[in-house]
Image (cartoon, helix red, strand yellow):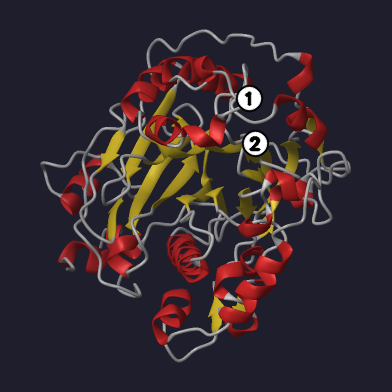
Amino acid sequence: MGCSACSRLHPFSPMTMASATLGQPLHKPIFFKPTSAISCSMVGPTSSSSSSSSIGSDSPRWNNPIPRHPSPSTSYDTPPDILRHWIELQQPLASEDRFTVASYNILGDRNASKHKDLYLNVPSDYIRWGYRKRVLCEEIMRWSPDIICMQEVDKYFDLRHTMEKAGYVGSYKRRTGDSVDGCATFWKAAKFRLLERESIEFKGLGLRDNVAQLSVFEMCRDESRRLVVGNIHVLYRPSRGEVKLGQIRFLSSRAQVLSNRWGNAPVVLGGDFNSTPQSAIYKFLSTSELNIKSYSRRELSGQRSCHPSQVLGVNSESSSVTVMDRLLNDCWTDEEVKAATGTANCDLVMHPLQLSSSYATVKGSSNTRDSNGEPLATSYHSKFLGTVDYLWYSEGILPIKVLDTLPIDTLRRNGGLPWKKIGSDHLALVSEFAFSRRTEDDEPAMPAVLRSD
C-alpha cells in the first residue's frame, strides 16, 4: 500500500504512506481523490530550480497567486436577534502577527434532504441549497477569516467559485464509501502560502469512511511564522466512541509529525468532533490521554444526553436507559481497544499534542458558555442541542478573541437551525490568534529531504 516517495518524506511515519500528489498550481484549488489511508505532498521553501529538481520537471513549484480581481468587501448586517459579539482576552498579546481561523460544519445538501425529520421546525425555503449557499457565504465574508475549515461539504466547486472571488484558495477531501460530502480548507492567498498538505482516509486504518485534512502554512509577510492546520469531521454515531478516539488520536499524531518537520510549528485543529464538552473524548483532547476501561464505549462522546427535550428540561425519560446502557456495555473487545488506542493490549489512549480550546481560553458569559467555558450549543436541530465543534490550539499561539455563540433562549425561540441568516444547523466558530513565540529559528528551516547538498 505504500510508496517510495512518501516513505522518504516520512521516514518515521507510524504507517505506510500513499502516493504523493504534487505540482498543481494553487490558483486552481486542490481536489483530493479518495485513494488511500494517507496522501501527502510537500512544497519546500526553496528556489524554483532546487524545487523542480526535487519533484521533477513535470511538477512546477507551487505558488499561491492572489486573484487579480478580488471582489470588493461587502457589509452584511445581522438581524438583532442573532447578533454575535466578539469577546477579547483580558490581556491580549501585543504580537503583530495575527490570523483568524474559522471552523464550520455547513450542513451538506444531501444530508439536509435525506434527514428532513431533523428540520421539521425550519421553513423549507431555508433548507434549499441555493438559499443556504448565499447565506453561508455572507456569514463567512462577514467574519473574513484567514483560514476556514469546513465540514460536510458536498458542493465544493459551487462554493469554490464564490470563495475565489473573495481571494481564497481551497483544497478538498471527499469521504470514502457512498457519502458525497467531505472536508474543505480555504485560506487567503494574500495572507498564507501552503507549504505541505496531507489527506487522511480513516478507512485505511479500519476507522470508517471519515476523512481529515492537514495543511502547513507560512505567513506571506514573514516566512518564519508557520502553522499546521487540521480539519476533521469525526464519526457521528454516538455509540462508536472507540472509532472517534482512534480518528482523533491519528489526526493528532500526524499533526505532530508535520509540526516537527516544519520547526515545531504551532497547531490548530478545527472541526466537528461529535463529542460534547462534558464527555470523556473532550477530556482526552484537553489532557492528551484517557484510560478507556474507565468508561463505557457507548457513552464516550456524551451525545446521547443532548436531545433538546433533555437539555431544555422537558423530560428526563432517557436517564434509566443511559444507566442500563452503561451496565451492558462496559466490556471492551480487543478490536475496540485497538481501534481506540492503536494496539489491542493497551488501555491508555494518548495523543502527542498539548491542546487547549480557544473558546475555553477566552471566557464568555453564562448566557452562552458552560462550566468548561465552551459554548452551550454549536448545533441545534430537532434531535440535538449542544456543542460538538471546537478550535483546539497548541503552544506557540494564543487566542486573543473569539466570536461568541448564541444564548440557548435565542436558539430556542426559533426551534432549530438553519435560520434566515444562518445557513447551517451548526454555528461557525471563529478565533483570532497571535503568535506567542518564534519557531526554532528566525530564518525558516528546510526539511532535510528538500535541502540542497
> Residue at the spot x=83%, y=46% of the render?
363
Q: Which amino acid does the dot numbered 1 rest on? A: Trp
Q: Which one is nearer the viewer's eye here, 248 or 259?
A: 248
Q: Is residue 106 visible?
A: no
Instruction: Please indicate whether residue 42 sits to the left or right of residue 86 in the image.
Output: left
Q: Which quarter shows the C terminus?
A: bottom left
Q: Which one is nearer the viewer's eye here, 154 or 397?
A: 154
Q: Which amino acid does the dot numbered 2 rest on? A: Val
The residue that mark 2 highlights is 430
* Element assignment for label 2: strand
Q: Quadrant of residue 347?
A: bottom right
Q: Which one is nearer the viewer's eye here, 414 or 397?
A: 414
> Residue at the spot x=36%, y=31% of the render?
64
Q: Which quarter shows the N terminus?
A: bottom left
Which percent across, then down, holds residue 164?
39, 20
Q: Quadrant of residue 39?
A: bottom left
Which percent across, then down, holds residue 344?
42, 87
The residue that mark 1 highlights is 143
* Element assignment for label 1: helix
| Residue contact between numbered discs 1 and 2, judged by CB atoms under 8 Å | yes
Q: Which one is nearer the viewer's eye here, 196 or 78?
A: 78
Of labels 1 and 2, earlier in sequence is 1
In the picture shown, does residue 160 fall above or below 385?
Answer: above
Q: Is residue 25 visible?
A: yes
Instruction: Please indicate whether residue 376 sits to the left or right of residue 180 in the image.
Output: right
Give the label on residue 304, or none: none
> Residue at the spot x=70%, y=57% of the render?
277
In the picture shown, does residue 192 fall above or below 339?
Answer: above
